[in-house]
Image (cartoon, helix red, strand yellow):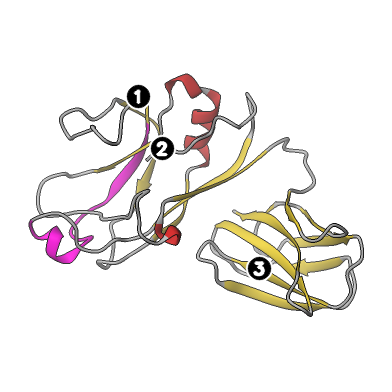
Amino acid sequence: MEFDLSSFPANSTVLGAFLSLSASGPIGAGTVGQVGSMGQNNAKLFRITSAWNDNTVTWNTQPTFTMVSAVPLAPSTYAMQNYINIDVTTLVQDMVTDPSNSFGFLLKEDNETPSRGLCFFGGLAPDPDKVPQLVIVYGDCGQIGIAEEDGDDNTRLMLSPSIASPGSVIHLEMSGTAGLSTLDLIDALGQSVLTRTISSWPVRLTLPALAQGSYTWRSQNTKGILLGTARMVVR
């Protein structure tokens, strides 16, 4: 898997990076082709260090990779298990720091003998939500917050801090005019894990117990018009 990181400023500090992979179910031949993810299929993610072409690459011509900062994956517990919010922060930091020797992720099982397998959708998944997703938060470690998207011309949702742990106090503020509205916290699967009705800004909330990963705060007015969104990483 390769993601375009060319827009990242040189020497960026990666504050958090999370990769999500969606299970595809049975694919290929043999037992895995009948079941999907199965067996003692613990694996690792590595940084690829040489160029490759997804139209021509094969097992015998697979690119080189480094074991530095490799990320372990636990074996699946059922055939259609998604791997959501895999913490690849250090691995992506290496990619940003050394872009000339970074060409994406290699997923490799620890034991590659039959029959075991991990089956995920790739970039040609029929459903865009099933395509591998990489969410990265980067910038100055002293940065107060990260505004991801404005709503209308008069509003913007601002968040502090943008990286937090359960139990932390989160400060959200809406610039511009914003009356009665809703505030939702959306996980990587697009599901709301927290909803609040907001009558006045700013807002202070205690972050509940959440799994680590990438989340999005989204605010809408009573007519369902987007006021703004802001990205947050839970660690």
Seen from the viewer's position, the closer of residues 184 and 203 is 184
Count up the numbered dots.
Answer: 3
The tag earlier along the polypeptide, 2 or 1, is 2
Q: Residues within 10 Å of mark 3 (few under 14, many from 20)?
A: many
Task: Pick out the residue farthest to the top.
Answer: 100
- Residue 30 in percent (x, y) is at 7, 57
Q: Secondary structure at mark 2?
A: loop
Q: Which residue is mark 2?
A: 2
Task: Give the number of the mark in front: 3 or 2.
Answer: 2
CA gap between label 3 and label 2 equals 28 Å
In percent of width and height, residue 114 lies at 9, 50
Circle 1 sits on which residue?
Answer: 51
Q: Quadrant of residue 218?
A: bottom right
Quarter occupied by the N terminus: top left
Residue at numbered disc 3:
185
Report how far apart the C-alphas of labels 2 and 1 lie in the structure. Answer: 10 Å
Q: Secondary structure at mark 3?
A: strand
Q: Which amino acid lies under the numbered mark 2 shown in the image of this protein? A: Glu
Q: Amino acid at mark 1?
A: Ala
Label 2 neighbour load within 10 Å: few <14, some 14-19, many 20+: some
Residue 98 lies left or right of residue 126; in this view the side is right
Q: Residue at x 53, y 61 (%)?
A: 188
Please state the extent of the stretch shown in magenta in the rendering: 30-47
Q: Position of residue 14 (x, y in %)?
A: 60, 37
Asked which secondary structure carries label 1, the reply is: loop
Report whether 21 appears left or right of 182.
left
